[in-house]
Amino acid sequence: MTDFDPVRRANVIGLGLIGGSVALALRERGWHVSGEDIDTATASAAVDRGVVDAIGLDDQAEITFVAVPVLTAADQVKRALAETSGAVTDVGSVKAAVCAAAADTRFVGGHPMAGSELDGLDGAQADLFEGAVWVLTPGPDSDDAVFAQVAAVVASFGAEVVALSPERHDQLVAVVSHVPHLTAATLMGLASERAEEHAALLRLAAGGFRDMTRVASGRPAIWLDICAENRTAIVGVLDQLIDGLGEVRDIIGSDDREALHARLTAARHARANLPTRVVHPDELSEVRIPIPDRAGAAAEVFTLAAELSVNIASFEVVHIAESTRGVAVVLVDRAMVELFRGGLLARGFRPAVQPLS
């Protein structure tokens, strides 16, 4: 890309559901997208359908998204770092291994918490990430400018950016994603076994059961790799779940109605208070944050937001004339802005706050 070329350029390696959706989101925003897939027929179909502009790897791309199975992600990240000059990120659901294996100033791990009932390129859609959480997992080698670049691109997809360490990410997704999938698969297996004895059982499965077991319809091969890569965290959470179910069994077995009511009430309250994404401009405030000259400062803004449960609705970095340092411009829930501002001040930032309207 020359100084006279106004078109931003990106690569996507792996053109399945997530990779295809990334490519579509980029193209919808005016990017020129080159793409690759291990299946040449999928790559050709992606060009024919307008998912990507070209097949191959553009060595001058600003950013490369690696969207391949978790066991092969590290190798593809290393390849992208060797063959391109821009930022590199991945989309795998396990982060510690790839971030350790591919540590580099130009690499920032990533994981969009989004999915679809459809698999592969057929399920790809440009708006898949709108309203979704996209976790970024910068390592100690990740450059601040690269982190800010990746964060700005994924935020432009309508995603909410959250920064976590790779290890913390893997612990948390074991709770909210990996173990729920295994639980759903186990419950579905139990129902299937009982259905052999009682033919009408699966016909009785109402909306609640279908909602709980929906994720069990995912492709098994993907989950073999995920469980292998994140087995320590998954086994730990499974142990906690088994202990929790044992406690519920004892409560019901002893007919302790008070304890059961307290447990169900606590769960209902926690479910009702799951955070939601702010979408109305009149509920937002703009926070301008000069980025200090210290490693990891940009990522620290997102880490703080996650710790305080502050949703970042939008993020960009602007550069002030005659200065090499950038200013992060973020939009957050107005009701949380003072908490966020206080946290920033306590960490040495100098934020300026103003409402959008």
Image (cartoon, rainbow, N blue to C red):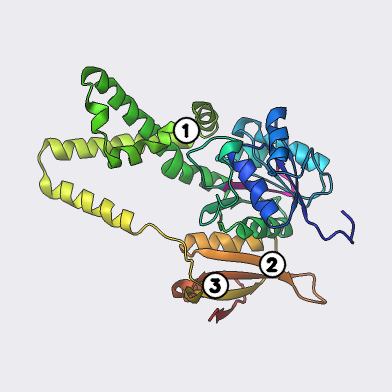
Residue 318: quarter of image: bottom right
Cα distance in 3D space between marks 3 and 1: 44 Å
Q: Which residues are magenta?
A: 102-111
User: Which residue corresponds to the image point at 57% horizontal and 50% vertical from the top-left?
Assistant: 165
Residue 184 is one of the magenta-drawn residues: no
Q: Can you give x and y, in whole percent of width and height, for residue 78 in the image?
A: 75, 38
| Crowd tier of the residue under label 1, counting other residues whose Cα lies within 10 Å: few below 14, some 14–19, many 20 or above | some
Q: Is residue 80 visible?
A: yes
Whether pointer 3 and pointer 1 mark residues with C-beta atoms closer than 8 Å, the reply is no
Q: Can you give x and y, in whole percent of width and height, for residue 253 in the image?
A: 13, 35
Residue 151: quarter of image: bottom right
Identify residue type, mark 2: Val
Circle 3 or circle 2, nearest the eye:
2
Q: Can you give x and y, in whole percent of width and height, for residue 138 in the image?
A: 64, 51
Residue identifier under label 3: 346
Which of the two residues, 307 or 94, is positioned nearer the viewer here? Answer: 94
Which of the two residues, 204 or 86, is positioned nearer the viewer here? Answer: 204
Q: Tag 2 or tag 3, which sits nearer the N-term?
A: 2
SS class, disc 3: helix
Residue identifier under label 2: 317
